[in-house]
Structures are given as C-alpha cells and as structure tokens.
Amino acid sequence: MLTHFVVAALLAQQPAQGARQFVAVSDSIVALTNVTVIDGTGAAARTGQTIVLRGGSIQSVGATASAKIPPGARTMDLTGRTVMPGYVMLHEHLFYPSGGGAIYNEQGYSFPRLYLAGGVTTMRTAGNMAGYADLNIRKAIDDGTMVGPTIDVTAPYLEGPGLPIPQVKALRDAADARKMVNYWADEGATSFKAYMHITRDELGAAAQEAHKRGLKITGHLCSVTFREAASLGIDDLEHGFVVASDFVPDKKPDECPAGNAVQRSIAALDVAGTGARDLIAELVRRRVAITSTLTIFETFATSQPSAPAKALDAMLPEARRQYEQRRAAIAQSPDTTWNVLLRKEMQLEKMFSDAGGLLVVGTDPTGFGGVVAGYSNQRALELLVQAGFTPVQAVKIATLNGATYLGRSAKIGSIAAGKQADLIVVRGDPSAKIEDVENVELVFKSGVGYDSPKIFESVKGRVGLH
Ligand SMILES: [Zn+2]
C-alpha cells in the first residue's frame, strides 16, 4: 500500500524532473556570433567566429564577417565566450562510494544532471553497480524525462572472485563470461568492462563475444597484464599505467599481486627505460586505447589540491564529512607514493599519446568521494594540461578522441558543419587559460541549449544521497 503511494508520488513528480525545466535555448535555428572556437581537432583556437545551428546540427562555422545568418535565426552575441565540442568522457559512473561496506550508491538523480552541466554530452559508464538502472536512465534521458548526456552503458563488471564489493558477480569460468556478455548485450548494454580478478581465459572469451556483436571491452586489470590483455583483444585499458601489473617481479598468471605490489613496481619503474617504451609500443601497435583518470589519482596525492568548494557544496553533508576526514588524513600522511605515481602516470600518458596511441579521458567518481561528476570532468582537462598537453590537445582528448574510440567521430566530438550540435559555451578562453573550462554558461545537446548553472544549482547537497 505504502509502496503504491510512493510510486504515485514519483510519477506525479516526473514532468518537473524532466529536461525541459533546464532548457534555455530551444529555437530551431540559432546563430552563436563573435565567439572563439576550439574545434576539438587539436587545431589552434579561432577568434571572431559564428556558428549556425539548425535542427540539432551544426549548419556552418566560420568567420563572423562572412557568416550567412539564416532568416528567422535566434542570434546570440557571445562576445567574450569560447565554444568547444561537448565532452565525450569514457570513465564515468552513475554510482558514488557510500563509505560503508564497499557499497556504491546509484546517483541516478544527481549525476546525469552534473555530467551535462559540466559539459559532458556523451559518456561511457566504465562500470555499472546497478544493472538495469543505468539502462533505464539512458532511456529516460533519450526520452527527455530526465536531463543528462547520451550514455554508452557498460554492463555489470566482468570480474573473478576476490573483490570485496557485494554488488559484483564473481565469474565461474570462460563459459560464464560468454553467457554474461550475451545476456547484457541482449538487454541493451553497449560496452563491457573487465575487472581486477578476471582470468585470461575469461577475458579472452568475453572479448570474443563482445566483438562478435560489434561491441567493445575495456578493463581495469590486475590479474591479467596489459600485454596479455592486448594479445587477447582488449580495446581499452582504464586508469593507464599505474594499474599495469606487467612490471611486478614474479607476477603469477591470472593472479592479482597481493598488497600494493603493482604500485611499488610502477613507483620503481624507469619511465624512459625500454620496459615502459616497449609496452607503449606494443599497445600502440595493437591499437589499444588508454583511458586517463588523473582526477581519481589526485585525490590520493598530497601534492594536489582538495576538491574545490563548489564540488564540496554538491555533496550531502554526511558524504562531505567522510570525504573531508579522509582527505585530511591523507594530507597529513608522510606517505607520498601517490605523488610519485601521479607524476609518472602523467609522463607515461604523454609518452603513449606522443607515440601515436589513442588517449581518452574520464573521471572515475569512486575512491573516497572526492571526484564529483561535472566538476571533475572540467578538472580532468586541467590535469591533462598539468601532464604536459597543450589546452587544445587536452580538449581533443576529451572530445574527438572519445568519439573516435566510440566509433562516433562522424557525428560527434568536434565542431564542423554537418555534425551534431553538441557544444559547450564558456566565459573566457580555455586555450589561453585552461581553468576557464569551469565557466560553463550553456551546454548544447543536439542543438538544445541547457542552462548549466541552473542544473548545478538543482543538485546542491545531493551527491551521495541519490
Ligand atoms: Zn571506475
């Protein structure tokens, strides 16, 4: 009985929760004039540009002086603003750590909003703790009853026994891995993720099944080395080199080395040595992408700042307290291993990209809660610049590279005539000052402009709750 009242109340709320309340621009023809354009290809920023949007697509982009603005267009003079492609970020989640018993709470209310408000128009959930919730949220967003990015939904984790997270199934064998891939592909999952205790047999079987269906598989690995995974056909490796077990002395096949042996091996690794360079060459040769997740790593490093005030304000007070206590303990700890690891990870990601590897980026809102969707997506670009990329290169990694990985670069990931009108409007110029990515005013998704500050405001104090 009570359940019925709750459901009725939820249904009654739905129109108010819908995407429309956040729409600031819905005209079918829009001209964004006098903007600076960072187009997502890595090209230099261009000033004095006009972008015309029509029917959800980009009709034209070029110098304002010669731009043809169609009759009936809504003209928005955006002097002082920069327009970039919407982010395509690949290590996102719809869950957040509860801080108790390794349970991750689904943030189906706040996270889709935060991602879009932060500038993400397409994301892959690299891991799923809630099964059908992620699939249904994708549909609700596509239907317009919820606001958020387009989601490439990853199935529940492909993981062996040994992980202390009760939400995750432990695979029995390779046949079980095949069964799981096909079950979730049938249900609508479009991506897969292997985890730390999977065996080579299970990973190989899962990769085969995913590929048969034209889908990709990534992994946060430990039991399987990067080199082994590459030979088994993995498409992408999450977190980059800090989790590579390739350099652990006496690594046993199919076993995740105990304790922090992997971290110690990377801390001791000569990044300029042949071991690192050969692994990078092998990954590039086999066209395995790397997903940079510097945002989660910096939460463990004493050399890096704490989460910004606005991200703290987004947290439920209890979640904020848990985060602040843990962060204070880390800040006072004499253990500076993560400072070294973060620096090495940055160097290795730059080397991988320079060697021709496809570097993509995501945020991974896990750890102890310091990575808050939306704000972290912006922070991810700042950290890529800290890693040595130029601002326009960082934008490319966060846009066109992600679209390329997803096989969607003909439609999304850069600003060009004919592409979907997925755009971010920021005050300032991130090509000159990367922190300007934080000044989002509008996010266009398929030509509809959403009010970013209004969306952020709507979820204050909610992260960690729902
Ligand atoms: Zn993750």
Image: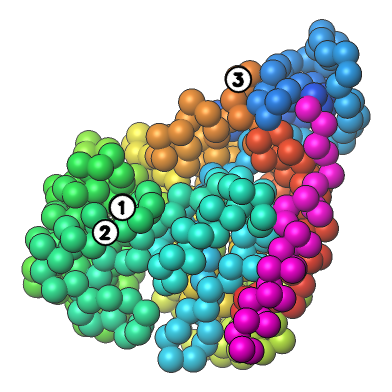
Indicate the quadrant containing the N terminus: top left, top right, bottom left or bottom right.
bottom right
**Residue wearing tag 2:** 183
Rendering coords of residue 99 (x, y %): 52, 87
Residue situated in front as seen by the camera: 379 or 53: 53
Residue 405 in view: yes
Residue situated in front as seen by the camera: 79 or 441: 441
Q: For the residue carrying disc 2, how many other residues have a C-alpha within 10 Å: few (<14), some (14-19), or many (20+)?
A: few
Say whether residue 19 is magenta: yes
Rendering coords of residue 233 (x, y %): 19, 46
**Residue wearing tag 3:** 418
Q: For the residue carrying disc 3, how many other residues have a C-alpha within 10 Å: few (<14), some (14-19), or many (20+)?
A: some
Q: Please, is residue 399 above or below residue 198 in the view?
A: above
Query: Which kind of residue does numbered mark 3 sit on?
Result: Gly
Q: Earlier in the sequence, mark 2 or mark 3?
A: 2
Furthest residue in direction front, as rendered: 1
**Residue wearing tag 1:** 186
Say whether residue 342 is magenta: no
Per the image, label 3 sits on a secondary structure element best described as: loop
Residue situated in front as seen by the camera: 292 or 273: 292
Q: Please, is residue 326 above or below residue 57 in the view?
A: below
Residue at the image position 66 percent from the left and 49 percent from the top: 144
Q: Earlier in the sequence, mark 1 or mark 3?
A: 1
Residue 374 in view: no
Residue at the image position 46 percent from the left and 58 percent from the top: 135
Query: Which kind of residue does numbered mark 2 sit on?
Result: Tyr
**Is 201 on the left-hand or right-hand side of 412?**
left
Q: Please, is residue 448 above or below residue 374 in the view?
A: above
Mark 1 or mark 3, which is nearer to you?
1
Per the image, label 1 sits on a secondary structure element best described as: helix
Residue at the image position 61 percent from the left and 30 percent from the top: 420
Q: Which residues are magenta?
A: 1-28
